Every structure is written in structure tokens, then in C-alpha cells.
Image (cartoon, coloured by chain):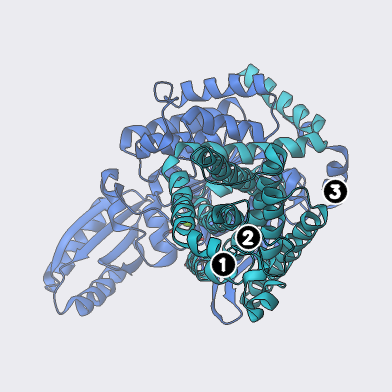
Amino acid sequence: MSAAVTLRPEAKKKAAMSRASKDSVIDVQHLVKVYGGRGQEEIKAVNDVSFSVGEGEFFGFLGPNGAGKTTVIRIITTLLAKTSGSVHVAGLDVERDGLDIRRMIGYTGQSIGVDGELTGRENLWLIGRLYHMPNSLVDERVEELLEVLQLKDAADRRAYTYSGGMRRRLDLGAGLVHHPRVLFLDEPTTGLDPQTRAAVWEYLRRLHREEKMTIFLTTQYMEEADQLCQRIAIIDLGKIVAEGSPAELKAAIGADIITVRITRDEAFEQSRNRALEIARTVSGVSRASIFDEGVSAYTADGGATLLEVLRRLDAEKVPVHQVALAHPTLDEVFLQHTGRQMRVEEVKPMSRSFGRRRR
Amino acid sequence: MVTDVGHAQRVIIGTRDEESSGGVLTEVGLVTWRSLVKLTRTPVLLFFSLFMPLIWLVMFSQTFGTVFSSATSGGLPGGPAATPLPYDYVAVLLPGITVMTAIQSASQSGFGMVADLESGFMDKFFVAPIRRSSVLAGKLLADGLRMAAQAGIILGIAAILTLFGWRIPFATGVMGAVLIMLLAAAFGVAAAAFGVAFSGLSNTVALRTKNTESTMMVSFSLTFPLLFLSTAMLPKALLPAWVQSFSTVNPVSYMADAARALILTGFDWAAIGNAFVAIAAFGIVLNGLAIMAFRAQGK
Ligand SMILES: Nc1ncnc2c1ncn2[C@@H]1O[C@H](COP(=O)(O)OP(=O)(O)OP(=O)(O)O)[C@@H](O)[C@H]1O
Ligand SMILES: [Mg+2]
């Protein structure tokens, strides 16, 4: 689908006039958002963020709680006013052309916005009609979505009787009724069990592959970004700290990573500093850094270097609690760029995320 | 999925074609539909917003009915005939009860919207290609329909009571009842718009909840003074002098006078006109205040 199909003539003119680059669907330059002010405490939630997303791209925003993901996505979807910077979708300005932008985008927010008093079918129908789709087309599309999202059996039950996963899927469907050209998803799989998550992933891949949809997704899960996104921006404390394809980001780190976790005792700080010094002097280690539980070292030849590191640590009586050798994951990318581990529980199975309070 | 891409194009064409005023009506209608469906599926809410006013209607007319009749046994002070009135106190009280019901429903309106904002449902409306004013209009239209229906139910129950010997003239019949429902709805919508503006304009959850709670408190503590310092409970001639003066600047009085005339005497177009002007002024002042409060507090 080319841009010309979706834009009305005057919108096209506006697009031509804007400074946005030609092939990017989403173009964000020097975006700043400050909450509060006027007597309230000011919070700089987004601090000079720039990036762009091409037509048909699957792009991910990866960052921990409070990084600014939701703020950015709400500004692009015209739900929130920016403080400064420029934001364009398909060449249209978020402040001037909100209505035209909203016509071509779909959005599924972080909190599940389905109406519990309406049935699943009614929820989807209402959204479709809000996009001025003809009735017959809405009906057809709603059936199709209920089928794909496996909500057919529950379609005529009120949504408050749905499980969390069913509600998530219904909410996702609501963002898709009108076949948006660009889809925005704010943490679409948080709170889902592993099977449902896998099913949602599969469906998103299909939308991207078969309908050539441009998808912008935010997530706290390394694995999710790695699995789905062609390009990732890592955001922390309102700033983009790294950007690239998952492979590029991982390649930038090095071949192998040795992680040494130090025993938590009174001398933890000293032990960790000692371990860092040791790691830096071992030949074969290209770079070493500390993280909250210990030290990580990057090396071209993990096996040999690991042995040497352990020998030295043992000789100096540094209390080692655990050692691991891994190929880099996005975890390490995050760690490398922020000096913190993203979320400890994410390394473990997803079931940990059950019952997490959603905002 | 070739068919899907086909859909997408048809959708877009559909969007372009319907950019007329018909589009706006559809938008408003959908928002209204959703509010009304929600309301009919939570009948408890409807029941309780009628329950209190009906209790009032019965209690007050019983307790003060005799006092009212003896006070007016020689006709209303300053009135023409020195004959007993041909109606009971309940006929006098009826307009006040419809106002009271409208105020109660209006104070709930802000809460509904805050719940939608917090659940994220409101985002569905805001991210759709519709105007925000359509969302507001749709919501207020649903509120208005609800208040009109409530006034209708109260009048209907009063009509049933006439079968048991209660003397309510209903001088203008069904047409008059419809006008009273309209008045109650207009008054209620003006108040609801205030509640919605006051609680919805803030962008933080805490402030919204705080504002909604204060709207509730304010409406609760203002309901009684507004009702009693107006002609809603008693005809003007029976009120003490200072209450009489206050009642002339109280919008509730104009609404009550028009409704009372419709029940007791006939179509008093001057009173009805005054009532709508008073309601409009009331709405403008209240919503101006809400916007000022919003500006002062920043975005
Ligand atoms: N309405 C608001 N008023 C004031 N501060 C806010 C508001 N919304 C968000 N913030 C602050 O802005 C920062 C970024 O929040 P944001 O919701 O964008 O983060 P996020 O990356 O989406 O986090 P999460 O993973 O928890 O959803 C946080 O420090 C948050 O406290
Ligand atoms: Mg968020």
C-alpha cells in the first residue's frame, strides 16, 4: 500500500511540505516531554529522543519501567501533547493533522481499554463503526478477528467475564478492526501466559509479513524485542541509549560474555571491585564492567578466558557465587549501555509476570 | 491475504466519503449508544438514583402536606381567591424532586468519565478519527436522555398516585410532562458538563479523582441549599423575604417555576423561556469556572 492511497489530496500537500524524510512512516526528531510544572514537580520523561521507522518495518522500543516508552507512543498517536521537538507520521504533523493521522493508525495501549459491560463482539463493532466503516464491512471484519484471536466462543459474553489474556487479545483486536497502516502496541504481551504470548507473537509476525503493516512495539522483554523486531531502540531514563537490529546490537558487544556473580556479604563492594580489576588484566578480555550482582567480561574466546578468570579469582580469594558463559543477548546490550540489569525476573520464565500490576 | 489489503482500501474510501455532518452524527450516536447500553446493563445505578427522590416525594408530601394545606387554607398569600387550593402539596413539590434527581445523576457523570479515562477505554475514542467534541457531546446526550427518562418515571409515578386520591392537576397533560422532562434534562446536562469538565480536564489520575470527589462533595452540599433557597419546595409567596430575594438569582427557581406552572396551571411560555435562559447562564458560568480552575492548575 503506498502513501498515496491513504492520504487525501490536501493531506498529501501537507506531507510534501513537511520536513520529514520521504520513506519514513514515523519520524521523531529531538522529542522532549516534561510533565508537571506550574507548582508541580517537573519530570523530564522524554529527553531529546530522535528516531525514524520505515514503511513496513517492525520496530521496537525496549526499556524498563519509567523509561518513557508510553510517553513517546502516546505522543506519536496524538494522545498526548509534546513539549518540544517534531513528530511526523506519514509526513503529517501530530499537532496539525491529528485527525488524518488517526485515520491510518491503530493503537493498543498499555492498560486494557475494553468496556467490560459490552460483549467482545460489541467492543469490536463499536470501534469499527467509529472509523466510519460501513456496517456490513464491520460485521465481516469483526467475525474474522474473533476467529483469529480465538474469541469466537466468548464473543457474546460481556468482556468483564473474560480472563486477562482474553481481554488482552480483544484489546489487540480493537486496534486492528480498521486495518491500520501503522500499528502501535504498548507492551502487548505483558501479563500473558507463555502459550498466549507465543500466539500473539505469531499473529503479529503474520500481520507484518502478509499485510505489510508497519508495527511499532514497546516492551520490557528482551526476548520479545529479539524475536519480533527488525530494529530496536533501547530507551532508558528518557534517552535512547542504543539503536540497531538485534544482531547488530549483539555483535557490537563481542563474541562471548563471562558473567561472574559475587557472594553477597559485607565485603561485596570490595570483592566486586577486585574482580573487575582482575578481569581487566586477564589476557583475552576485551572489556569488563560491573553490574549490580558482579562483573561481566567480554571476550573472543569464552572457554579459555573463563578458566583463566576463575583461576585468578580463586587465587585472590574473591568469593564467587556463580559463573556463567553466554553468547550475548539483548540483556547484555542493555547492561552494557546502562550499567544496570534490566529486570532480574525476566531472565527467568515468563510466569513471573503474572499478577504484575498494570498501569 | 490479498482480501485483507482490499478491505483496507475499502475502509479508507469509506472514511473519505463519510466526512459529512452525517459522520459527526454517527460519532455522537455511537458514543451515546455505548453510554446507554452500559447504563441499562447496570440497573442498580439507575434504581438508586431514583430511589432517594421518590422517598423524598412521598415523605415530604406526607409530612408537610397538612402544614401546607392549613397555611394555604385561605389561598396563597397575595393570591386572588380565598378558597382552598384545588391541589395537594405533592403537586407543588414535584418540580423540586425532578431537579433533585437531575443533580444527583449529574454528579455521577464525572465519575463515569474518570473510570473510562483510567481504564484506558477513553483512549479508544481519542485515538479514533473522531473529534473530541463528538465524544463529549455523545456522553452528555446520553446523560440528558437518562435524566429525561428519570423525570418521566417520577412524573409517571405521580400520575399513578392521582389514582389513589392525590390531587395533582397535570394541567398540560403529556405535552407538559415532556416539557418538564426536557427542562430537567437541560438542567442536568448543564450540571453534568461541569462535573465532566472539572474532573476530566486534569491529566493526572490523582487530580482527576480528587476533582471528581470534590465535584461530588460540592454537588452534594449544594443540592440542599439550592433546593431550599429556591421556589422548588414552596411557592415564592410562602417563602421568607430573604429567601425570596435569593431565589431570584437561583437557577433552580426558574426551572421549578416553569415546571410548576405546567403542572398546576398551563403553558406559561414566559416562565419556560426564563427557565431555559437561566439554565444556559448556569451552564456557562459553571463551565467557565471549570475551565478557569483547569488553567490555574496547568496541564
Ligand atoms: N501523567 C504524568 N504525570 C507526571 N509524570 C508522569 C506522567 N506519566 C508518566 N510520568 C513519568 O514519566 C516517566 C516515563 O513514564 P512512562 O509511562 O512513559 O514510562 P514507561 O517506559 O512506559 O514505563 P512502564 O514500563 O512502567 O510502562 C516516569 O518517570 C513517570 O513517572
Ligand atoms: Mg508504559
Residue type beneath disc 2: Ala
Q: Are marks 2 and 1 in contact (CB under 8 Å)?
A: no
Q: Which quarter of the rendered picture does the N terminus of chain A lie within?
A: top right
Looking at the image, is mark 2 or mark 1 earlier in the sequence?
Answer: 1
What amino acid type should be assigned to the residue bearing mark 3?
Lys
Colour for chain A in the figure: blue
Q: Chain of mark 3?
A: A
Which numbered dot is residue A14?
3
Q: Is residue A283 visible?
A: no
- Distance, label 3 to label 2, CA atoms, is 41 Å
What chain letter is assigned to the residue under label 2? B
Q: Position of residue A21 (x, y in %)?
A: 76, 50
Residue contact between numbered discs 3 and 2, judged by CB atoms under 8 Å: no
Please state the horizontal and vertical placement of residue B35, each as a whole percent of the image: 56, 42
Indicate the position of residue B270 as horizontal and vertical percent values.
82, 57
Disc ID at residue B191:
2
- Do circles 3 and 2 both sit on a common chain? no
Q: Secondary structure at mark 1?
A: helix
Give the residue type that dot 1 points to: Ala
Find the distance from the CA under tag 1 to the CA under tag 3. 74 Å
Q: Circle 1 is placed at which residue position?
A: B71
Q: Is residue B11 left or right of residue B58?
A: right
Please name the color used to draw chain B. Answer: cyan
Question: As drawn, is B138 to the left or to the right of B221?
Answer: right
Whether residue B179 is visible: yes
Labels 1, 3: one chain:
no
Q: Nearer the viewer, mark 1 or mark 3?
A: 1
- Residue B276 x/y as whole percent: 76, 57
Q: Quadrant of residue B19?
A: top right
